[in-house]
Image: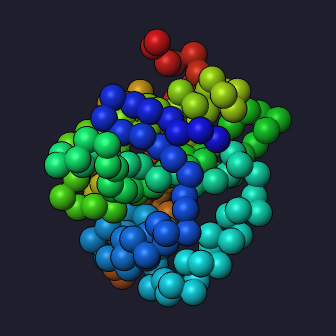
Amino acid sequence: MPHLFGKRIRLRAVEQSDLDIFCRWINDPEITENLLLVYPMSQVEEARWYENMLQQPPSNHVMVIDIQTEKQPDSWQAIGNCGFMNFDWRNRSAEIGIMIGEKDQWNKGYGTEAMRLMCDYGFNTLNLHRIFLRVFEGNERGKQAYKKAGFIHEGTMRQAHFRDGRYWDVDLMSILKTDKKD
């Protein structure tokens, strides 16, 4: 897949050289607080994940979220990743996930832009009809980004996620191809 370009970001394929930064991100509890990752991840495990991902169809590959560096406009910096999973091809549906791993890039709208770009790709290239996600109770920053990208709240799975010694609600949000305003 070629790069996907937004106004301020690009989405590109994961390279083996990205694994060190991914490992740093997924071993930071503040970054993974709103993800399903609960165990530390070694470099070896991350390399195994990468090799397994490459065996999957391209639609299941994670993409890196890059921004242009301020000092060198032709240079890009990885700030996160995103991708589709849990495809249901008969119903043209998939789940989407995102992680902004560079904390100094939080609250700048990059997550919203990445979600919009991924939805355009999902609807117009993969021919999806519905894209959904799960967002944990307390992740207000994520909920706002998803709403700005056009996702709507579908419902709540009560106490469906265990973290920090307690159960948390999980909200389901989705966007349909017909919801998109081009």
161 with respect to 124 (left or right): left
Query: Would you say residue 161 is visible in this rendering?
Result: no
Q: Quadrant of residue 150?
A: top left
Vertical side of 174 occupied by 120: above or below: above
Colour theme: rainbow
Q: Residue at x 47, y 66 (%)?
A: 18
Toward the viewer: 59 or 169? Answer: 59
**Lateral position of residue 77 relative to residue 87, left or right:** left
Taking the spot 67% from the left edge, 51% from the top edge, the residue there is: 60
Question: In this picture, is 37 found above or below 134?
Answer: below
Q: Residue 81 vs residue 132: left or right?
A: left
Q: Is residue 96 above or below residue 21?
A: above
Camera-side residue of 117 and 51: 51
Residue 158 screen position, x and y as percent: 46, 57
Q: Residue at x 23, y 61 (%)?
A: 103
Please state the horizontal and vertical placement of residue 130, each as a whole percent of the image. 62, 31
- The x, y position of residue 151, in whole percent, is 44, 32
How many numbered discs?
A: 0
Instruction: Determine if residue 103 is in view.
Output: yes
The residue closer to the viewer here, 135 or 96, is: 96
- Check the image and report above or below for 33 versus 96: below
Q: Residue at x 32, y 67 (%)?
A: 31
Q: Residue furthest right?
A: 90
| Residue 154 on image: x %, y % | 50, 36
The quarter of the image holding the N terminus is top right
